[in-house]
Amino acid sequence: MTRMLHFSNRLVIGGLLCVLFFGCTQKPSDSTRTDDQGSATTLDVTPRIERVLTREERDQLTPDDVIKILKEGNQRFVSGTLTSRDHSQQARKAALGQHPKAVILSCLDSRIPVEDAFDRGIGDVFVARVAGNFENTDILGSMEFGCKVVGAKLILVLGHEHCGAIKGAIDNVELGNITAMLSNIRPAVEHFADYKGEKTGENDEFVHMVTEQNVRMTMANIRAKSPILNEMVSNGELKIVGGIYNMETGTVTFLE
């Protein structure tokens, strides 16, 4: 009996050691995954990027360089080849300073992962968000800080297809503070007073037209309402561009 108890104890201890050091349940290695066809593919699990952009690196960039970087990053996002990053290390290394390349003004919409959409990491871009991606005093002040004080080289106004704020402005939605918010988008709707089609949020063509016009008006308003940013554009230190995010594909089309 005693010998059986000793043997049982050894089995328990052996089992614990197995769990602690080796794991008794088989699971795929961290370096493999199973694709949709059930085949195992090898992954590089070592993060490729763990540092953040330095001031010197950012200052060497031109506004056109930043546009190119964002376009190439969006292509990687669409193709599913996002850069591997060690966000934990990046967060630590960015703690004492930041040197972003760009300010991106996006809609509030949760379906637009701004940093991922351009394959950017921690410390790469400033992101401002408001439903309908329009400018106001607070956002203009934030842009002036990001560009004039910190040194970002680009402002991107990013609209998107199927925007609820755009549809709300088209349909004259009235609800609490949403009413006042949508008034910022109404000029883009009124721009198409002569449009002969159906002016409702159900008309995808009209929604797209207003979405694009809202981006263009916001770009113009940024320059008109911020002498600081306008001067930076005039001096070639800054560019203000617009883009439309496609919900189905993740592609960002930059406006000419």
Image: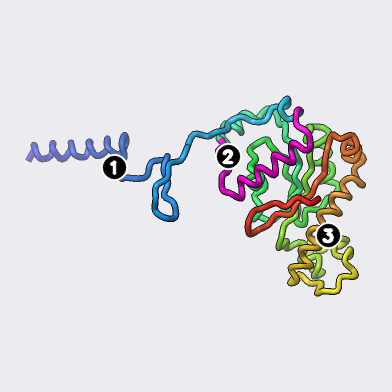
Q: Position of residue 107 (x, y in %)?
A: 73, 54
Q: Earlier in the sequence, mark 3 or mark 2?
A: 2
Mark in front: 2 vs 1: 2
Q: Position of residue 60 (x, y in %)?
A: 75, 28
Q: Residues within 10 Å of mark 1 (few under 14, many from 20)?
A: few
Please state which amino acid type lies under the numbered disc 3: Ile
Question: Circle 2 — which element?
Answer: loop
Q: Classify residue 224 as left or right of residue 22.
A: right
* Residue name at image x 75 percent, y 31 percent: 61
Q: Which residue is mark 2?
A: 83
Q: Quadrant of residue 48?
A: top right
Q: Which residues are magenta?
A: 60-85
Q: Classify residue 160 as left or right of residue 191.
A: left
Task: Please say which color scheme the image uses.
Answer: rainbow
Q: Which residue is mark 1?
A: 24
Magenta stretch encompasses residue 197: no
Please state which amino acid type lies under the numbered disc 1: Cys
> Residues under labels 3 and 2: Cα distance?
35 Å
Q: Which residue is mark 3?
A: 185
Quadrant location of the N terminus? top left
Q: Position of residue 251 (x, y in %)?
A: 67, 53
Magenta stretch encompasses residue 62: yes
Please state which amino acid type lies under the numbered disc 2: Thr
